[in-house]
Image (spheres, rainbow, N blue to C red):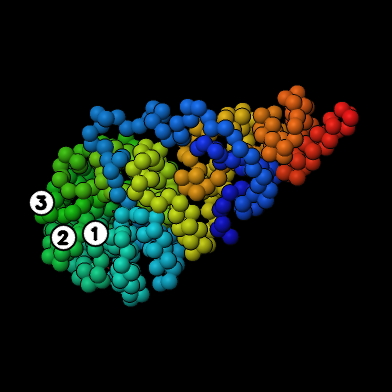
Amino acid sequence: MCDHSDPGATQKVNGAAPETHVGIDTSMSLGSNGAPANGAEVRRQPHLGDTGNAGNVQPFNSRYSDFLSNVSNFKIIESTLREGEQFANAFFDTETKIKIAKALDKFGVDCIELTSPAASEQSRKDCEAICKLGLKTKVITHIRCHMDDARIAVETGVDGVDVVMGTSKFLREYSHGKDMTYITKTAIEVIQFVKSKGIEIRFSTEDSFRSDLVDLLSIYQAVDKVGVNRVGIADTVGVANPRQVYDLVRTLRGVVGCDIECHFHNDTGCAIANAYTALEAGATHVDTSVLGIGERNGIPSLGGFIARMYTADREYVMSKYNLKALREVENLVAEAVQIQVPFNNYVTGYCAFTHKAGIHAKAILANPSTYEIIRPEDFGMSRYVSIGHRLTGWNAVKSRCEQLELDLTEEQVKEATAAIKKLADVREQTMEDVDRILRNYARSIEASAA
Ligand SMILES: CC(=O)SCCNC(=O)CCNC(=O)[C@H](O)C(C)(C)COP(=O)(O)OP(=O)(O)OC[C@H]1O[C@@H](n2cnc3c(N)ncnc32)[C@H](O)[C@@H]1OP(=O)(O)O
Ligand SMILES: O=C(O)CCC(=O)C(=O)O
Ligand SMILES: [Zn+2]
């Protein structure tokens, strides 16, 4: 149910590198997610001056003058097994958690964050089991700012503990009822205790963007002074916009020496943009979850965040992360939480690399960089050109003729294209329909020439 491989029924075109292929398949059924049924392939010539989709021709790379930016030097705290477990549909048994942890390790995330061991006896056991897997990724757990939780956490074998406490007026009044003096004192106690066990510690303020700036900076400064490894900013309700994020992170960067982690909810659609902006302003770590699952409508998806970062610094992202492992971990999580991967998912969505309109198709066939900023092959994906519809053009049809080894002149291809469009005005044409039209047309030309 969660398979989200390439769309069938379109023309398959792999073409950024020399010696690339064009495969064709023209029906466009959203139900079928398998590889194209009819993948006849033809060669296309490499395009001179094809610098690749995310090469240095694009003008939006970060500026050298942007000395604060960590866009080319960031870490991912992957929270599918913590924030993701807070998604309404999520129930991860031990086996599933282990599979997800291993898949994230294979992808190469820097840290995985696990549900608090104080949540339940099974959560504690699962945390211990994942710590024993010997993963390359750091294993971190996430707890309240409370000594009882900290004592349980340090016994699990984790590499790090993420501590959080609400600082907004809302949470101080209606969640835990504690004032800033109490919060600061407890935070310092928890940090010193966790550090005394030789374990990494992060302190985060929940609902940071609705907290008082002076309160925030004071507590961050206090925890930095006692040697916290990271501080965290959390947009718990998804209220922040990129400009506000930039201002807060940049201000904080001037106040603490430790690393800065950021956590953004997606209630108002800014989560990935906010994460990117936080890195530009000097944050070092970003929280993600696979497919963005989490409380309500979640946080930045691992795939979406990676797509953004790849576009900013392809070399860094490709050298650090195993991008071809993205699809596997998405499928795993989608199945575990019983959802479909969205049709428009970043990178792996059903039609993320499908080009339809004739104008696009022509240019894509000449050079994929015209209409793609991500190279599908970097993620183990394929490119498609859809031709069995009325928006098609003769250039796309010509490429199919070449695949079918039909020797037609430009004028003849144009005439065949008109025939396809006429029929496609009535209904979408499948690949078989298009091939039949083209073959019949070629036969009729041959017959009239004989
Ligand atoms: C924004 C976020 O996503 S933060 C992470 C959320 N994660 C979780 O909640 C983990 C799963 N949670 C649980 O299993 C449970 O809520 C537990 C074990 C943590 C606590 O359970 P309970 O003791 O039954 O308390 P309950 O959940 O009803 O209320 C939360 C308690 O934590 C307190 N609390 C809330 N936030 C914090 C905090 N950041 N630090 C310390 N204490 C806190 C509240 O005041 C309340 O205390 P109370 O028992 O004196 O009323
Ligand atoms: O610990 C954090 O920084 C974030 C906690 C959280 O999930 C949130 O505030 O939404
Ligand atoms: Zn959250």
Left or right: residue 423 versus residue 135 is right
CA gap between label 3 and label 2 equals 11 Å
The residue under label 1 is: 163
- Whole-percent x and y of residue 208? 27, 47
Give the residue drawn at x 22%, y 44%: 212
Looking at the rendered structure, the secondary structure element under dot 2 is: helix
Residue type of the residue flagged with mark 1: Val
Disc on the earlier residue, 3 or 1: 1
Q: Would you say the beta carbon of the disc 2 residue lies within 8 angstroms of ligand 1? A: no
Disc on the earlier residue, 3 or 2: 2
Residue type of the residue flagged with mark 2: Ile
| Ligand 1 found in image quarter | bottom left
The residue under label 3 is: 225
Give the residue drawn at x 65%, y 47%: 39
State whether residue 282 is above or below residue 199: above
| Quadrant including the N terminus | bottom right
Give the residue drawn at x 66%, y 29%: 395
Could you classify mark 2 by the number of other residues whose Cα lies within 10 Å: few (under 14), some (14-19), or many (20 or more)?
A: many
CA gap between label 1 and label 2 equals 8 Å
Contact? badges 1 and 2 (CB < 8 Å): yes
Left or right: residue 320 versus residue 259 is right
Residue type of the residue flagged with mark 3: Lys
- For this rendering, which residue is in front, 73 or 244? 73
Can residue 376 be seen by looking at this rendering? yes
Contact? badges 3 and 2 (CB < 8 Å): no
State whether residue 142 is above or below residue 55: below
